[in-house]
Amino acid sequence: MWLILAFLSATLLGFYDAFKKKALSGNAVIPVLFLNTLFSSLIFVPFIVTSYTTNVLDGTIFHVATGGWEVHRYIILKSIIVLSSWTFGYFGMKHLPLTIVGPINATRPVMTLVGAMLVYGEVLNLYQWTGVILAVISFFMLSKSGKKEGIDFKHDKWIYFIVLAAILGAISGLYDKYLMASPQNGGVGLDRMIVQSWYNIYQLGMMGVMMMILWWPTRHKTTPFRWHWSIIFFSIFLSAADFVYFYALSIPGAMISIVSMVRRGSVIVSFLFGAALFHEKNLKAKFVDLLLVLLGMIFLYFGSR
């Protein structure tokens, strides 16, 4: 069941990337990010209010548990990590082709695996090392593909933004494992709905401050904000993808490493959108890079079983 949910989350995440690219094209990044956190919060506020004031959602997958500072401090830290990843990722997504951003983001499971090795002392087997090496090779091949479009991986700051966003995303994945694991297994044992509901709300507060301090005073000197319907849609697809992801992790026996790998299969959906909707260039070379990334994920899958 959790594996099917991981594939569903991957599909939803691919649509999220496509709508996000559409919303960011020629648009101001900070207001778009603010609206994403706003709409995502509005989706979960009814679940919070209903759970705290009635018994209607008790025993359902939509019930939001209560918790004091000892719980919310962990959620606030997650909000900071995720929002930092999103900020770098949104700026990078705006300035780079989706067919380059997608494969780079798809290497997150490799980063998570290496992080697990460093943080949790996990030992990689031959399959996993093969997956890591293939991911590294695909990254260098992708850099060659980027040069054909005038994108120099060594000197393009937006590439560094995407890579940093991917690293922070991998850290968030490791942190999720810690939050969801039971205390008996060295984790915190948080309810998945309280994490997803409240981290959106905390991000909204942080983005509100960022809007007032960074964007509002300079809004007439930077890229103007334009409303686009895709902003609502990518918020919906993101919330749905995360809901399915957290639900998959909450199922007994679910493996974070495999869920993370399958979830990054979203690159297939986003790559197709990049080719069909945005008419991006140099697709043959990028497709070979994508195949290497996917092959690396397959090796990681068999190595993590």
Image: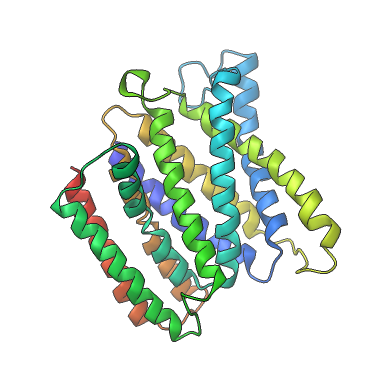
Left or right for 20, reference 275: right
* Identity of the residue furthest to the left in this view: 126
Which colouring convention does the figure follow? rainbow
The answer to whether residue 213 is above or below residue 79 is below
Whole-percent x, y for residue 107 in the image:
36, 58
Left or right for 48, reference 172: right
Answer yes or no: is residue 4 visible: no
Residue occupying the point 51% across, 55% down = 16
Left or right for 31, reference 43: right
Residue occupying the point 69% across, 50% down = 35
The answer to whether residue 93 is above or below residue 48 is below
Q: Quadrant of the C terminus?
A: top left
Left or right for 284, reference 224: left
Residue occupying the point 47% across, 38% down = 243
Residue occupying the point 21% across, 43% down = 123
Given residues 209 and 54, the one toward you in this image is 209
Given residues 174 and 61, the one toward you in this image is 174
Image quarter of residue 157: bottom right
Count of numbered circles on the image: 0
Whole-percent x, y for residue 223 in the image:
75, 69
Answer yes or no: is residue 81 visible: yes
Whole-percent x, y for residue 63 in the image:
52, 22
Q: Quadrant of the N terminus?
A: top left
Whole-percent x, y for residue 229 in the image:
67, 59
